[in-house]
Every structure is written in structure tokens, then in C-alpha cells.
Image (cartoon, rainbow, N blue to C red):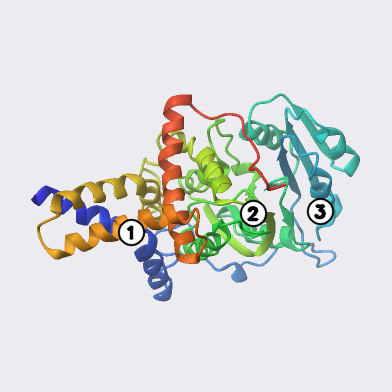
Amino acid sequence: MIFALILFWLCTGLLLFTHIGYPVMLWLLDFIGLGGRAGEVRGPKLSEIPPAVDPDTDEELLPSVSLIVAAYNEETVIEAKVRNALELEYPRELLEIIVASDGSSDGTVEIARKAGADLVLDLPRGGKIAAQNAAAEAAKGQLLAFSDANSIWEPGALGELIEPFRDDRVGYVCGQVSFIGPDGGNLEGAYWRYEMRVREMESELAGVTAGNGAIYAVRASGYIPLRPSGSHDLSLPFALAKRRLASLYRPRARATEKLVPSLDGELARKRRMMIGLWDIVVGEGMLDPRGYPPLYLFELFSHRMLRYLSPALHLVAFLTNIVLLGHGWFYGLTMLLQILLLLAALLGRWFPILPLRVARYYVEVTLSIALGLWDRWRQGPPGAWEKAEGTR
């Protein structure tokens, strides 16, 4: 009884903390001005760091940038992506556009070359990370910017994205991605607005704990070649933190992507993403606390570790709640609330009203973590990648 009571409140408390308490605590820490202190990698504000200037012309000296697009069978969007890159408000002589084709069997390579990419790598099939590693090795830029093939950047996005690199302590910067198109019941766009606000507060405190694949950049000197099971979104921020390089969020660097048009498609996408989670958390050392600045370790535990543990926390909370039934009306109420959540998620498949859609989205996204781990156990580490259906 006592053991079940402790486990129930521990799991329930951790779930409430990661989804609600953690954002509130970030806001409070930022409000009292703790961001950038306690020995973190942050220091002077960006506005206090003057840009490099040509002594002869007084013009700002901009870094060279290699914009890398990993692509697998992207013939329907790659021309528009290269054209979008060419239209960015950045000196053309300082911008190198690289398309890394991961064994594409369609016209991706030929179309990218005709569209004006500076370098097109026709690589054997090896996975997204392998393609990005090859492109990073061939790139000439001082900064490496990365984009999905279906991401469209605003004209000034690149300039906004690279500005924080004036600070030598910054190793990674991600921009803001917005999702467009009919949601079909998928609440990913709404979730991302919440997530971006959390990352904005993390950026002000000790650095973001994850990025996004649509728009981000890293110093060429700080680029870390990852294993095929890795992910730039999840791996680079924590790996760079151990090198005392900050990973920041730049909301004025904006990009758009087409939303997965159904929640079933979103679940499948997240399930594929979660297959490599074990390798990142354990194999790449995210779980190892050594080397993290204290505030960043707090962020990583609160935002990433507890989120990844959510399926287990929910399961333990449910099972211990069963044990506690009959020990007061409160535990009857908590069991009822858990059952109603599951029932609402089930009904959300047929009745697309907002409360049911929210319940379905939450349950299925949480479930995707467990399903990804199951797939990893059955299939081994991930390598190849597939596009999310309906996003092109």
C-alpha cells in the first residue's frame, strides 16, 4: 500500500511537472533574471557583441555558409527548395547550396543540378544522417545550415539564423518552423506553438534541449558526425552542451512546412522518429550527466528525459491507482479521470471535437514513444528514412 502510494504520486507528479510545472518554472527563472548565470556557457547579450567589420569599408563581415539539404526521392519539391535557397537575402558569393541525395531513385539529382545547386552529391543509400555527414565533410562554409527538402524559408531567415554565431560560445541555432495546410485532426501545429515557446525560454536560460529539422545551423568547426541512428534535432544540442557550446532558438528565423494531414500519419511519423531514441539517450550519452552545465542538466531532465519516460509513468500511475482503489474517494476520482482520458482519445477517432482531438493527440503521441522503442527492439537501430505521407 505505501509503496503503491509513493509510486502513484511520484509518477503523477513527474507527469504534471514535465507538461505544466517545467514551463512555469522556466518562466519564473527567466523572470528573476537567472538566465546565463551559474557557470553556464551564456554570457553577454548578443546586442553587446559587435559584428566583425571590414576596416576599409566599414561593412559587416559575414561568414560563409553552406546550406545543406538531405534528400531522398524529392523530385516533386527539390526544384522549389533550391530556388528558395537562391532567393535568400544573403550574399550569393558567401552561400553554398548543397543537395545530398541519399540514394534517390527518381529525378532528384538531375533536377537539383538544373535548379542551380552548387554541389549535388549522388550518394548510395545510407540514411539521412549519413547524407548530412557526407555533405558536411564536402562543405566549404564556416557555418553549416540545414533544411528539409520541403521546408520553405523566409527571405531573411538565413541572416537571422546565423546572427547569434557572433558569440563564439554559440555552437547551434534553430529557427521557428510553422506548419501549414489542413490538419485533418492533427494538432501538431498547436503543439509546436507550445513547444517553441518552451524552447524560447530554454534558450534564454541555458540553451535548447532539441531543435527541428526545418531550419537550423551549426559551426563547421563544431559539427559532430553522428551514427546513422542519431538525429541532429536531438543529438547536437546536448553533445555541444558538453563542449560548453550553447544551442539557441532564434524565432525570427522562420520557415514553413506542410503539416502531416492526419493524426494517424503523425503517429506513424513520430513512431519512426522514436526508433532511434534508445541509441541517442543511451548510446550517444544523453543520459550521462557528466559535462553538462547545471542549468542545462535541469532542462534536459525536465524536458527530454521525463517526456521520454511518459509512457512508463502513465502505466505505473494507472496500475498503482488500481491498487489504491478503496482507499478513499480521491483515488476513485483519479482512476475515473484516467479512464475518461483513454475513452476520449478513442472517441476522438470518430468525433473530431476539440477536447476529444486533444485527448487523442496526447495519448497517441505518448504511445509513439513506446511503439518506437518496441520497433527498435524488434528491428535494431534505424538507418534509412522515409518521408511523412502527405507532406510534399
Please tell me which residue lies in front, 28 or 307: 307
Which residue position holds label 3? 84
- Do the residues bearing badges 2 and 3 touch, measured as CB atoms within 8 Å? no
Q: Could you tell me residue 315's position as x and y percent?
A: 29, 46
Name the kind of residue labelled 3 in the image: Asn
Rendered image: mark on residue 124:
none
Crowd band around label 1 with a 10 angstrom C-alpha radius: few (<14), some (14–19), many (20+): few
Marks 2 and 3, the one that precedes in the sequence: 3
Rendered image: mark on residue 259:
2
Q: Is residue 41 left or right of residue 173?
A: left
Q: Could you tell me residue 239's position as x and y percent?
A: 49, 43
Instruction: Identify which residue is drawn at 66% across, 36% down.
Output: 132
Residue 230: tell me if it is visible. yes
From mark 2 to mark 3, how far is it between C-alphas? 19 Å
Local SS, label 1: helix
Q: Is residue 322 left or right of residue 40?
A: left
Marks 1 and 3, the one that precedes in the sequence: 3
Name the kind of residue labelled 1 in the image: Leu
Q: Quadrant of residue 367?
A: top left
Q: Quadrant of residue 330?
A: bottom left
Mark 2 vs mark 1, foreground winner is 1
Instruction: Identify which residue is drawn at 80% across, 31% down.
Output: 106
Name the kind of residue labelled 2 in the image: Leu
Which residue position holds label 1? 340
Crowd band around label 2 with a 10 angstrom C-alpha radius: few (<14), some (14–19), many (20+): many
Mark 2 vs mark 3, foreground winner is 2
Q: Could you tell me residue 50's position as x and y percent?
A: 66, 67
Crowd band around label 3 with a 10 angstrom C-alpha radius: few (<14), some (14–19), many (20+): some
Residue located farthest toward the front when viewing the structure as drawn? 350
